[in-house]
Image (cartoon, grey):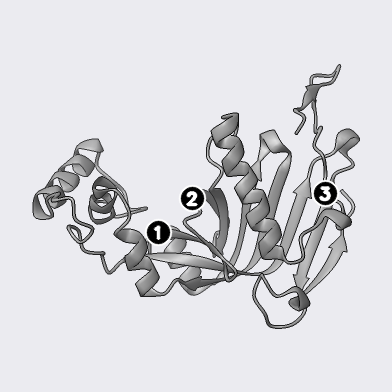
Amino acid sequence: MTTGEQSGTGRTEYAGVGLGEEGLAATPFRQITRWVGEARARQQEQGDVPEPDALSVATVDDDGPDVRTVLMRFLDARGPGFVTNLRSTKGRQLEVRPQIAASLTWPSMFRAIRFRGTAELVERAEVEAYFRQRPWGSRISAWASEQSQPATGRAQLEAAYAEYAARFPDHGRPDDVPVPEHWGAIRVRADRVEFWAGRMNRLHDRLVLTRVTPGDLDDAGAWRLTRLQP
């Protein structure tokens, strides 16, 4: 993969290898996992993809659109997913309006994947299995943080953390800390997936897969391919 070069105007040329129809995987899921795997490998090999699983998530409420960055913690043929306090701003927004958009972006690789679709709750068994794999401190924070609520200061957060750390001490077991009822995960059930690949002279590749029949991301017959102009 070549890196970007600065033009005479100080702008970066997107010197990526692009993505043609002939190089697209047979299903959206296979292309997603290919690019995610390559981003994770590049993090290990070159270090210029600091967080390959960073997922920007957009929601909407009465005040308009809202966006934030989380970490993708689930990825299978049903779609990407992330964990959250279900009482948080995004959790409450999605409960009222489940429409969701998300994107994975790797600037150093001149690549991005965009998702549009509907949010759904990840099954509790999957949430609990993932929670038990988290470091003890992260499990404690899930109890201590009333996500998106105002805080009087750092001391309030530290005090809450200390309280739950004493309640659920670390014995090195996956069940040391129970899963809070308000803690869960959201999956993006995509109806549209776009693969963006930066190219020289801003002639980027944009390949969009749109759902045309029921089916998951690994069902080739459920998707129609369209190329969009950059």
The image shows residue 69 at horizontal and vertical percentages of 52, 48
30 in relation to 163, above or below = below
Mark 3 or mark 1: whose residue is earlier in sequence: 3
- Please give left or right for residue 180 compared with residue 82 in the image: left
The image shows residue 60 at horizontal and vertical percentages of 57, 62
Name the residue at 19% across, 37% down. 155
Tell me the SS state at disc 2. Answer: strand
Mark 2 or mark 1: whose residue is earlier in sequence: 2
User: Is residue 87 at least partly visible in the picture?
Assistant: no
Name the residue at 86% across, 64% down. 226
Query: Which residue has dot 2 on it?
Result: 70
Q: Which amino acid type is marked by label 2?
A: Val
88 in relation to 108, above or below = below
Depth-wise, is mark 3 or mark 2 nearer the camera? Answer: 3
In the image, 9 versus 48, the foreground residue is 48
Tags 3 and 2 touching, CB below 8 Å: no
Query: Which residue has dot 3 on it?
Result: 19
Tags 2 and 1 touching, CB below 8 Å: yes
Which quarter of the image is occupied by the N terminus?
top right
Tell me the SS state at disc 1. Answer: strand
Q: Which amino acid type is marked by label 3?
A: Leu
- Please give left or right for residue 50 compared with residue 91 in the image: right
The image shows residue 30 at horizontal and vertical percentages of 68, 61
Query: Which residue has dot 1 on it?
Result: 84
Name the residue at 77% across, 70% down. 210
Name the residue at 69% across, 83% down. 214
Tags 3 and 1 touching, CB below 8 Å: no
The residues bearing labels 3 and 2 have C-alpha atoms spaced at a distance of: 26 Å
Q: Which amino acid type is marked by label 1?
A: Thr
